[in-house]
Amino acid sequence: MPDQIAYELSTRYTPYADGAAVLDLEQIAPKSINAFDRPLASLHLALDPGHVGGIWAEWEWRNFRISKEDHWVREGELVLEVAQRIRTRLTRLGAKVTLLREDCRPINPKTFIDYWPLAAAEEVPSTELSLKAQLGHALAVRNRAIHLAIVRGEIAERARLVNEVIQPDALISLHINAAAWPDGDTEQVVDSDHAHVLIFGCLSEAELALPRQQLRLVEKLSNGSGAVEARLGAALGSALIEATGLPASDYQGRNAIRIDPDVPSLWARNLMLLRLVDCPTVLMEPYITNSHSSYARIQKALSARECHEPLPADDILVEYADVVVAGVLRAYERH
Ligand SMILES: [Zn+2]
């Protein structure tokens, strides 16, 4: 920056005097950046680092490592760093960026105690009076209440916050995908690694029959979010495949559908967050955390952070942030 200022002093501001000798260039930090350098100046984007992480990672079933020497892989923590990196980059490009969480605590003000009656109603009590049976039931109610608080209640609260308070132009929800463990064996990584992005759609007949889901479908059809989701989703989906070189994920069955023949990584699916949020929303699902390739890259990334070493050139979290920045620019850039 001082070089640029010195250049401007000598060619424009003090061309016939030695401005650089008089002024302390290190002290000069230009505040307003040229509008042409801020292509996203009118964009307000919300970022949802998916899940919670920290002490809740185990309850979210998003906490694993292959061997005892490895770093724990916690999706909620990885995507929080990705969100912070995206915010830094997009803010420099002029966008206003709001994160739905800044640490590994739930934003849902309700705790599992608040969900206890609901959990108790869902878990059928044992008719057996033995201590073992009764303790087993109490444990099941507690586990259900925690799940309701940090998964379902948390997603509902995030959607409410976006709809009622933040009201951004769009929301990007950041996740990292994982594959089912082969034969339930957590010691075994899988071969297949792939990536995709999701937008709202693909309601089943049973879902369509529910009045609350019908209302959401009508809202999403009438509020104009659909076309933006398709455009932003296509931009993020194509940036994702180009940058990672991964194949597009494939859904078997009828719970998701491809909507753009040019972007095979873009799928429509009826996920709770995608349904509940009013504004255009895209959910990212790059990488398979428990695949050979991505697991190794995540371990490398976590080691570098733990040892305060320079990040690897192919750092997976930096790559993820780059993908989102590239996709957002592709979708919104005015120049
Ligand atoms: Zn996730």
Image (cartoon, rainbow, N blue to C red):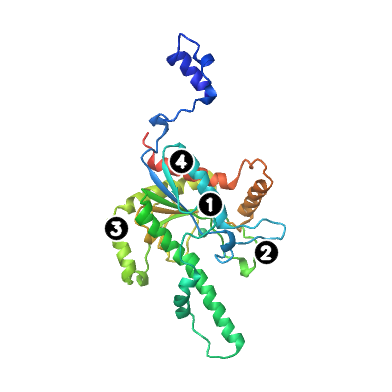
Disc 3 to disc 2: CB gap under 8 Å: no
Q: Is residue 296 above or below residue 95?
A: below
Q: Which mark is residue 90?
A: 4
Disc 4 to disc 2: CB gap under 8 Å: no
Mark pair 2, 1: CA separation = 26 Å
Q: Quadrant of residue 257?
A: bottom left
Mark pair 4, 2: CA separation = 38 Å
Tell me: 44 left or right of 311.
left
Q: Amino acid at mark 2?
A: Glu
Residue at the outermost left position: 222
Q: Which mark is residue 221?
A: 3
Q: Amino acid at mark 1?
A: Leu
> Tag 2: Cα neighbours inside 10 Å, few (<14), some, or many (≥20)?
few
State the residue position of label 1.
80
> Tag 1: Cα neighbours inside 10 Å, few (<14), some, or many (≥20)?
many
Q: Amino acid at mark 3?
A: Leu
Image location of residue 184, percent across then percent down: 62, 69
Image location of residue 62, percent across then percent down: 57, 62
Residue 83 appears anywhere in the view: yes
Q: Earlier in the sequence, mark 1 or mark 4?
A: 1
Tell me: 41 left or right of 287.
left
